[in-house]
Amino acid sequence: MDSIFSALPHFSMIEWILTGSLFLFFLIQLFFYLSVYRKPYLYEKKRKRSIVPDEELPGISVIISSKNNSEELEKNLPFFFEQDYPNFEVIVINSGSSDETDMVLKAAELRYPRLYHTYVPAEADEINEKKLALTLGIKAAKNDILLFTESYCRPCSRLWIKEYGKEFLDGKEIVLGYSKLLIRKNVHMRNFIIFDNLIHHLKFLSMAIAHRPFMGIGRNMAYKKELFFKNKGFSQVLSIDGGEDDLYINRIARRSITGVVISPESITETDSVDNFSTWRALKSKYLYTKQFYEGFPSRVFGCETFSKYVFYTVFIAATALGIVWHNYLLLLFTFLLFVIRYLVQLAVINKNSHLFRAGRYHINLIFFDIFQPFNNLQFRKYANRRNGLRR
């Protein structure tokens, strides 16, 4: 023990600065994982499961916009009509499709009496085409609760609608959910794509649980029809390409009216990501509209990313210095903080991953953790070029 303390005075000013910086950003990282990212699985663990009589459940309208997705729509539609829910309808809007979507919907109409479908003309404004499609679906809805997903998605269970219905009984006006990706093993970067999708959801779901909602995802979310018209529809985001889900929720969500539903039964899934390009298109949509988010909660994770890279940078510098100067106490302290952070991160990510069925992580977590912000930056540049935006 005396030998350890006797080594302390031999720390140079540079070593003290590195040690202090590493410890500071270590604490910031622990705060994010233990106080933010841990929220979803803790929330679900503490959730009280209740049985609600069918007559108390509110009516729900499922709204799906489809553009040139006839094969996926035909494959996924039966999952919606197999739902164990007493009062629901499914509204599909054919958004200017040039494939066989109209034929699929007319055939499905004969089989499913709960189905209603309409269309958006092919010559509609391209920027706001989907917003127009959703608005038509919302106006046609018979129920006040609107549950949104995509034609390339399907519910993971027959209780999907019921999980949302029960959440609205608690007085919520917006409810956000999780949507997982089913990806074949031969798809390039499969494990990283699944990890990226998990982290993306953990961010906005964690903040919603903390009563700081800042976005939602159109593959699985719901809000009230009354709220939509109260906020004058999509008028706040009409000038932006996309944003009918994440950016719209960013504009209207408030802590007192926003909830989450993250049980395994409430998840939707899609197997449409069959190559890198499809994933880039899906991911870039959110990275583009993210630039228009308002409010402090949407910027919180920029601090987390910054603190992460500073932690890794200082760790490398302190390790190199410890080796060159033979300061084994510095090396021990540096590696101790690195291992503790890694183990905490691993535990939090794997527990959430188990909840959302998003695989299991080990040493690859370190590489995914470092690479993800770089990948997001590249995708954001791609999205800005595609949309003609320099920002």
Image (cartoon, grey):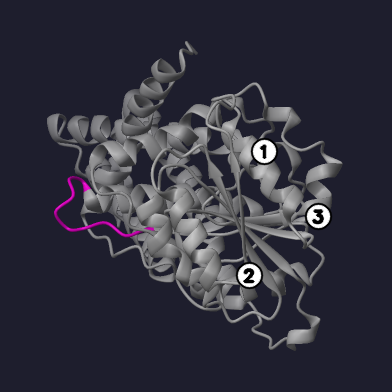
- Residue in the image at 24% along x and 60% along y: 362
Q: Which residues are magenta?
A: 181-189
| Real-space CA distance between mark 2 and mark 1, rounded to the nearest whole angstrom | 28 Å
- Residue 332 included in the magenta stretch of the image: no
Q: Determine crowd level at label 2: few under 14, some 14-19, many 20+ residues with C-alpha closer than 10 A.
A: some
Q: Which mark is residue 12?
A: none
Q: Determine crowd level at label 3: few under 14, some 14-19, many 20+ residues with C-alpha closer than 10 A.
A: few
**Considering only order in the chain, which callout, 2 or 3, is on the residue closer to the N terminus?**
2
Secondary structure, mark 3, is loop
Q: Are marks 1 and 3 in contact (CB under 8 Å)?
A: no
Which residue is disc 2 drawn over? Answer: 114
- Three-letter amino acid code at the position of disc 1: Tyr
Which residue is disc 1 drawn over? Answer: 248
- Three-letter amino acid code at the position of disc 3: Ser
| Real-space CA distance between mark 1 and mark 3, rounded to the nearest whole angstrom | 17 Å
**Considering only order in the chain, which callout, 1 or 2, is on the residue closer to the N terminus?**
2
Secondary structure, mark 2, is loop
| Real-space CA distance between mark 3 and mark 2, rounded to the nearest whole angstrom | 32 Å
Foreground pick, 59 / 207: 59
- Residue in the image at 50% along x and 57% along y: 105
- Three-letter amino acid code at the position of disc 2: Arg
